Amino acid sequence: MDSPTVLVTGATAAVGSDLIPALHARGAAVRAMTRPPGRPLPGVDNVVADLRDPGSIAAALDGVDRAFLTSPSEPGAADLQIAFADLARDAGVDRFVLLSRYAANPDPPVRVPRRHAEVEAHVRALGLDHTVLRPNLYFQSLLAFAGTIARGFFAAPIGDAAVSAVDTRDIAGSAAAVLTGEGHTGRTYTLTGPRAVTHDEIAQALSAATGREIAFRDASAERFTAALAGVLPRRRLDGLVEDYAHYARGEAAEVHTSVADLTGHPARDITDFARDYATAFAPE
Ligand SMILES: NC(=O)c1ccc[n+]([C@@H]2O[C@H](COP(=O)([O-])OP(=O)(O)OC[C@H]3O[C@@H](n4cnc5c(N)ncnc54)[C@H](OP(=O)(O)O)[C@@H]3O)[C@@H](O)[C@H]2O)c1
Protein backbone atom coordinates (compact mmCIF):
# COMPACT_ATOMS: atom_id res chain seq x y z
CA MET A 1 0.00 0.00 0.00
CA ASP A 2 1.54 3.33 -1.06
CA SER A 3 0.19 5.74 1.52
CA PRO A 4 -2.00 4.14 4.17
CA THR A 5 -4.28 6.25 6.31
CA VAL A 6 -3.79 5.54 10.01
CA LEU A 7 -6.26 6.36 12.76
CA VAL A 8 -4.27 7.61 15.77
CA THR A 9 -6.21 7.48 19.04
CA GLY A 10 -5.03 9.54 22.00
CA ALA A 11 -3.70 12.02 19.46
CA THR A 12 -2.98 14.67 22.08
CA ALA A 13 -1.38 12.28 24.61
CA ALA A 14 2.36 11.70 24.93
CA VAL A 15 2.69 8.80 22.48
CA GLY A 16 -0.03 9.87 20.02
CA SER A 17 1.27 13.40 19.59
CA ASP A 18 4.74 12.07 18.69
CA LEU A 19 3.27 9.34 16.49
CA ILE A 20 1.69 11.83 14.08
CA PRO A 21 4.96 13.38 12.81
CA ALA A 22 6.62 9.94 12.88
CA LEU A 23 3.90 8.57 10.56
CA HIS A 24 4.12 11.60 8.27
CA ALA A 25 7.89 11.06 8.04
CA ARG A 26 7.18 7.52 6.81
CA GLY A 27 4.70 8.72 4.19
CA ALA A 28 1.46 7.73 5.92
CA ALA A 29 -1.64 9.92 6.14
CA VAL A 30 -3.10 10.45 9.61
CA ARG A 31 -6.60 10.70 10.96
CA ALA A 32 -6.15 12.07 14.48
CA MET A 33 -8.76 11.15 17.06
CA THR A 34 -9.42 13.44 20.01
CA ARG A 35 -12.29 13.14 22.39
CA PRO A 36 -15.14 15.62 22.66
CA PRO A 37 -15.16 18.60 22.42
CA GLY A 38 -12.10 17.86 20.26
CA ARG A 39 -8.86 19.74 19.63
CA PRO A 40 -8.19 20.21 15.91
CA LEU A 41 -4.56 19.39 15.11
CA PRO A 42 -2.69 20.84 12.12
CA GLY A 43 -1.82 18.79 9.05
CA VAL A 44 -4.12 15.84 9.73
CA ASP A 45 -7.68 14.70 9.12
CA ASN A 46 -9.28 15.42 12.52
CA VAL A 47 -12.03 13.28 13.99
CA VAL A 48 -13.76 13.68 17.35
CA ALA A 49 -14.79 10.43 19.05
CA ASP A 50 -15.14 8.91 22.49
CA LEU A 51 -14.17 5.33 23.35
CA ARG A 52 -17.37 5.21 25.40
CA ASP A 53 -19.47 5.98 22.31
CA PRO A 54 -19.33 3.05 19.83
CA GLY A 55 -21.11 5.03 17.11
CA SER A 56 -18.44 7.72 17.19
CA ILE A 57 -15.68 5.08 17.04
CA ALA A 58 -17.28 3.31 14.07
CA ALA A 59 -17.39 6.66 12.26
CA ALA A 60 -13.77 7.40 13.18
CA LEU A 61 -12.68 4.02 11.77
CA ASP A 62 -14.70 4.35 8.59
CA GLY A 63 -12.34 4.57 5.61
CA VAL A 64 -9.01 4.22 7.44
CA ASP A 65 -6.56 1.46 6.52
CA ARG A 66 -4.83 1.03 9.88
CA ALA A 67 -5.41 1.89 13.52
CA PHE A 68 -3.28 2.63 16.57
CA LEU A 69 -5.04 2.15 19.89
CA THR A 70 -4.09 3.64 23.21
CA SER A 71 -6.45 4.15 26.10
CA PRO A 72 -6.84 6.06 29.34
CA SER A 73 -5.16 4.61 32.45
CA GLU A 74 -8.39 4.10 34.32
CA PRO A 75 -10.65 1.31 35.53
CA GLY A 76 -12.79 0.06 32.65
CA ALA A 77 -10.15 0.89 30.03
CA ALA A 78 -9.81 -2.78 29.02
CA ASP A 79 -13.49 -2.98 28.08
CA LEU A 80 -13.14 0.20 26.01
CA GLN A 81 -10.12 -1.23 24.18
CA ILE A 82 -11.87 -4.54 23.52
CA ALA A 83 -14.92 -2.73 22.11
CA PHE A 84 -12.64 -0.62 19.88
CA ALA A 85 -10.83 -3.72 18.59
CA ASP A 86 -14.14 -5.36 17.67
CA LEU A 87 -15.18 -2.24 15.75
CA ALA A 88 -11.78 -2.12 14.00
CA ARG A 89 -12.29 -5.72 12.86
CA ASP A 90 -15.82 -4.85 11.66
CA ALA A 91 -14.45 -1.82 9.80
CA GLY A 92 -11.95 -4.05 7.97
CA VAL A 93 -8.74 -2.31 9.02
CA ASP A 94 -5.79 -4.17 7.56
CA ARG A 95 -3.44 -3.51 10.49
CA PHE A 96 -4.11 -2.91 14.15
CA VAL A 97 -1.41 -1.80 16.59
CA LEU A 98 -2.23 -2.11 20.27
CA LEU A 99 -0.39 -0.09 22.89
CA SER A 100 -0.21 -2.49 25.81
CA ARG A 101 2.27 -2.48 28.67
CA TYR A 102 5.54 -4.05 29.81
CA ALA A 103 4.95 -7.36 31.59
CA ALA A 104 1.32 -7.58 30.49
CA ASN A 105 0.53 -10.79 32.28
CA PRO A 106 -2.74 -12.57 33.05
CA ASP A 107 -1.65 -13.38 36.60
CA PRO A 108 -2.31 -11.17 39.61
CA PRO A 109 -1.26 -9.14 41.57
CA VAL A 110 -0.66 -6.06 39.38
CA ARG A 111 -3.99 -4.91 37.97
CA VAL A 112 -2.97 -2.64 35.08
CA PRO A 113 -0.75 -5.17 33.25
CA ARG A 114 -3.35 -7.85 33.98
CA ARG A 115 -6.01 -5.78 32.21
CA HIS A 116 -3.69 -5.15 29.29
CA ALA A 117 -3.17 -8.93 29.05
CA GLU A 118 -6.94 -9.39 28.74
CA VAL A 119 -7.04 -6.95 25.84
CA GLU A 120 -4.05 -8.60 24.16
CA ALA A 121 -5.74 -12.02 24.38
CA HIS A 122 -8.93 -10.63 22.88
CA VAL A 123 -7.08 -8.96 20.00
CA ARG A 124 -5.10 -12.11 19.23
CA ALA A 125 -8.33 -14.10 18.99
CA LEU A 126 -10.01 -11.62 16.61
CA GLY A 127 -8.12 -12.71 13.52
CA LEU A 128 -7.01 -9.14 12.77
CA ASP A 129 -3.56 -8.35 11.39
CA HIS A 130 -2.19 -7.02 14.65
CA THR A 131 0.99 -6.10 16.53
CA VAL A 132 1.33 -5.52 20.27
CA LEU A 133 3.68 -2.93 21.77
CA ARG A 134 4.55 -3.31 25.44
CA PRO A 135 6.32 -0.16 26.65
CA ASN A 136 7.81 0.11 30.10
CA LEU A 137 7.32 3.18 32.34
CA TYR A 138 7.46 6.39 30.29
CA PHE A 139 10.21 8.92 31.04
CA GLN A 140 7.51 11.48 30.28
CA SER A 141 5.61 10.26 33.39
CA LEU A 142 8.17 12.35 35.30
CA LEU A 143 6.35 15.42 33.99
CA ALA A 144 3.63 14.65 36.55
CA PHE A 145 6.28 15.37 39.22
CA ALA A 146 7.36 18.66 37.61
CA GLY A 147 5.83 20.70 40.44
CA THR A 148 8.03 19.21 43.17
CA ILE A 149 11.02 18.74 40.87
CA ALA A 150 10.94 22.51 40.31
CA ARG A 151 11.29 22.75 44.11
CA GLY A 152 14.25 20.33 44.13
CA PHE A 153 12.87 16.85 44.78
CA PHE A 154 10.49 14.08 43.76
CA ALA A 155 9.23 11.15 45.78
CA ALA A 156 7.86 7.69 44.97
CA PRO A 157 7.66 4.27 46.67
CA ILE A 158 10.37 2.55 44.65
CA GLY A 159 13.55 2.56 46.76
CA ASP A 160 16.68 1.77 44.78
CA ALA A 161 15.02 -0.50 42.23
CA ALA A 162 15.97 0.06 38.60
CA VAL A 163 13.41 0.33 35.79
CA SER A 164 14.16 0.13 32.06
CA ALA A 165 11.96 3.17 31.44
CA VAL A 166 11.48 4.40 27.88
CA ASP A 167 10.95 7.69 26.07
CA THR A 168 7.52 8.14 24.45
CA ARG A 169 9.25 9.49 21.33
CA ASP A 170 10.79 6.04 20.91
CA ILE A 171 7.45 4.34 21.50
CA ALA A 172 5.97 6.57 18.80
CA GLY A 173 8.89 5.84 16.45
CA SER A 174 8.46 2.11 17.02
CA ALA A 175 4.70 2.33 16.45
CA ALA A 176 5.24 4.26 13.20
CA ALA A 177 7.67 1.59 12.00
CA VAL A 178 5.20 -1.18 12.76
CA LEU A 179 2.24 0.69 11.23
CA THR A 180 4.08 1.34 7.96
CA GLY A 181 6.57 -1.52 7.66
CA GLU A 182 6.27 -5.23 6.94
CA GLY A 183 6.90 -8.38 8.93
CA HIS A 184 5.27 -7.38 12.22
CA THR A 185 2.02 -9.33 12.00
CA GLY A 186 1.30 -11.25 15.21
CA ARG A 187 4.46 -9.96 16.86
CA THR A 188 4.76 -8.56 20.39
CA TYR A 189 7.53 -6.03 21.07
CA THR A 190 8.63 -4.99 24.54
CA LEU A 191 9.85 -1.39 24.40
CA THR A 192 12.43 -0.24 26.94
CA GLY A 193 15.18 2.30 27.28
CA PRO A 194 18.81 1.32 26.70
CA ARG A 195 19.42 0.53 30.39
CA ALA A 196 17.54 0.18 33.65
CA VAL A 197 17.81 3.28 35.85
CA THR A 198 17.12 3.90 39.51
CA HIS A 199 15.23 7.00 40.63
CA ASP A 200 18.50 8.27 42.15
CA GLU A 201 20.05 8.04 38.66
CA ILE A 202 17.02 9.87 37.24
CA ALA A 203 17.55 12.62 39.84
CA GLN A 204 21.24 12.84 38.86
CA ALA A 205 20.31 13.17 35.17
CA LEU A 206 17.75 15.89 35.95
CA SER A 207 20.28 17.72 38.16
CA ALA A 208 22.91 17.65 35.41
CA ALA A 209 20.48 18.82 32.75
CA THR A 210 18.87 21.62 34.76
CA GLY A 211 21.96 22.77 36.64
CA ARG A 212 19.99 22.56 39.89
CA GLU A 213 20.22 20.01 42.71
CA ILE A 214 17.28 17.62 42.36
CA ALA A 215 16.95 14.80 44.88
CA PHE A 216 14.95 11.60 44.84
CA ARG A 217 13.24 10.73 48.13
CA ASP A 218 11.95 7.24 48.69
CA ALA A 219 8.40 7.39 50.05
CA SER A 220 6.18 4.84 51.70
CA ALA A 221 3.12 3.76 49.73
CA GLU A 222 1.02 5.47 52.42
CA ARG A 223 2.79 8.84 52.05
CA PHE A 224 2.66 8.59 48.27
CA THR A 225 -1.06 7.85 48.41
CA ALA A 226 -1.69 10.70 50.82
CA ALA A 227 0.24 13.14 48.61
CA LEU A 228 -1.80 12.22 45.54
CA ALA A 229 -5.21 11.91 47.20
CA GLY A 230 -7.44 14.46 45.53
CA VAL A 231 -5.13 14.60 42.50
CA LEU A 232 -6.03 11.14 41.14
CA PRO A 233 -9.23 9.15 41.68
CA ARG A 234 -8.84 6.51 44.40
CA ARG A 235 -9.01 3.45 42.14
CA ARG A 236 -6.47 4.91 39.73
CA LEU A 237 -4.21 5.76 42.66
CA ASP A 238 -4.48 2.19 43.97
CA GLY A 239 -3.38 0.93 40.54
CA LEU A 240 -0.44 3.34 40.54
CA VAL A 241 0.70 2.16 43.97
CA GLU A 242 0.57 -1.43 42.70
CA ASP A 243 2.65 -0.37 39.71
CA TYR A 244 5.32 1.12 41.99
CA ALA A 245 5.37 -2.01 44.15
CA HIS A 246 5.95 -4.00 40.94
CA TYR A 247 8.84 -1.68 40.00
CA ALA A 248 10.24 -1.82 43.55
CA ARG A 249 10.36 -5.63 43.38
CA GLY A 250 12.71 -5.27 40.41
CA GLU A 251 10.17 -6.73 37.98
CA ALA A 252 10.52 -4.00 35.34
CA ALA A 253 14.27 -3.91 34.79
CA GLU A 254 14.83 -6.08 31.71
CA VAL A 255 16.34 -4.27 28.74
CA HIS A 256 15.09 -5.15 25.24
CA THR A 257 16.49 -4.02 21.88
CA SER A 258 13.12 -3.58 20.11
CA VAL A 259 13.31 0.23 19.87
CA ALA A 260 16.64 0.11 18.05
CA ASP A 261 15.56 -2.90 15.99
CA LEU A 262 12.36 -1.17 14.83
CA THR A 263 13.52 2.43 14.44
CA GLY A 264 17.12 1.96 13.41
CA HIS A 265 18.42 4.27 16.15
CA PRO A 266 19.38 3.59 19.77
CA ALA A 267 16.68 4.05 22.38
CA ARG A 268 16.94 7.41 24.17
CA ASP A 269 18.56 7.33 27.58
CA ILE A 270 17.37 9.20 30.68
CA THR A 271 20.16 11.73 30.00
CA ASP A 272 18.61 12.46 26.58
CA PHE A 273 15.17 12.92 28.13
CA ALA A 274 16.52 15.15 30.90
CA ARG A 275 18.38 17.35 28.39
CA ASP A 276 15.40 17.69 26.03
CA TYR A 277 12.81 18.36 28.76
CA ALA A 278 14.95 20.41 31.17
CA THR A 279 12.80 23.53 30.77
CA ALA A 280 9.68 21.59 31.82
CA PHE A 281 11.25 21.16 35.28
CA ALA A 282 12.25 24.80 35.78
CA PRO A 283 10.78 26.77 38.68
CA GLU A 284 7.94 29.10 37.61
N1 LIG B 1 2.26 6.26 31.62
C1 LIG B 1 3.13 5.24 31.57
O1 LIG B 1 4.26 5.26 32.10
C2 LIG B 1 2.72 4.01 30.79
C3 LIG B 1 3.66 2.98 30.60
C4 LIG B 1 3.31 1.86 29.86
C5 LIG B 1 2.04 1.77 29.31
N2 LIG B 1 1.13 2.78 29.51
C6 LIG B 1 -0.21 2.64 28.93
O2 LIG B 1 -0.42 3.69 27.98
C7 LIG B 1 -1.81 4.02 27.94
C8 LIG B 1 -1.94 5.52 28.08
O3 LIG B 1 -1.45 5.87 29.33
P1 LIG B 1 -1.08 7.37 29.62
O4 LIG B 1 -0.51 7.42 30.96
O5 LIG B 1 -0.32 7.91 28.44
O6 LIG B 1 -2.52 8.02 29.65
P2 LIG B 1 -2.97 9.47 29.29
O7 LIG B 1 -1.80 10.39 29.24
O8 LIG B 1 -4.09 9.75 30.19
O9 LIG B 1 -3.49 9.36 27.80
C9 LIG B 1 -4.66 8.71 27.51
C10 LIG B 1 -5.23 9.25 26.17
O10 LIG B 1 -6.51 8.67 26.00
C11 LIG B 1 -7.44 9.71 25.75
N3 LIG B 1 -8.73 9.35 26.33
C12 LIG B 1 -9.07 9.31 27.63
N4 LIG B 1 -10.37 8.92 27.75
C13 LIG B 1 -10.83 8.77 26.49
C14 LIG B 1 -12.08 8.39 25.95
N5 LIG B 1 -13.13 8.09 26.72
N6 LIG B 1 -12.22 8.31 24.59
C15 LIG B 1 -11.18 8.62 23.78
N7 LIG B 1 -9.96 8.96 24.23
C16 LIG B 1 -9.79 9.04 25.57
C17 LIG B 1 -6.89 10.94 26.42
O11 LIG B 1 -7.47 12.06 25.82
P3 LIG B 1 -7.22 13.54 26.39
O12 LIG B 1 -5.91 13.95 25.77
O13 LIG B 1 -8.39 14.28 25.87
O14 LIG B 1 -7.18 13.44 27.88
C18 LIG B 1 -5.41 10.77 26.14
O15 LIG B 1 -5.12 11.26 24.86
C19 LIG B 1 -2.47 3.21 29.07
O16 LIG B 1 -3.05 2.06 28.50
C20 LIG B 1 -1.31 2.82 29.97
O17 LIG B 1 -1.54 1.64 30.70
C21 LIG B 1 1.45 3.90 30.22
Image (cartoon, rainbow, N blue to C red):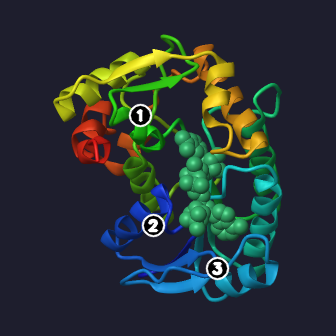
Q: Which secondary structure lies at badge 3?
A: loop
Mark closer to the observer (2, 1): 1
Q: Is residue 67 left or right of residue 53?
A: left
In space, the residues marked 3 and 1 are separated at their CA atoms by: 31 Å
| Residue 148: image location, x then y, percent | 41, 34
Query: Eyeballing the image, is 164 above or below 260?
Result: above
Query: Eyeballing the image, is 158 above or below 14?
Result: above
The amino acid pointed to by label 1 is Thr
Mark closer to the observer (3, 1): 1
| Residue 101: image location, x then y, percent | 62, 41
In space, the residues marked 3 and 2 are separated at their CA atoms by: 28 Å
User: What residue did someone put label 1 on?
Assistant: 148
At horizontal 45% and vertical 16% (from top left) the residue drawn is: 217
Q: Which secondary structure lies at badge 2?
A: helix
Q: Is disc 3 surrounded by few (<14), some (14 to 19) or many (20+) residues within 10 Å?
A: few
The amino acid pointed to by label 2 is Thr
| Residue 54: image location, x then y, percent | 80, 78
User: What residue did someone put label 2 on?
Assistant: 180
Query: Eyeballing the image, is 137 above or below 247?
Result: below
Q: Is disc 2 surrounded by few (<14), some (14 to 19) or many (20+) residues within 10 Å?
A: many
User: What residue did someone put label 3 on?
Assistant: 36
| Residue 149: image location, x then y, percent | 36, 33
Mark closer to the observer (3, 2): 3
Asked if marks 2 and 1 touch (Cβ < 8 Å), the reply is: no
At horizontal 75% and vertical 60% (from top left) the residue drawn is: 81
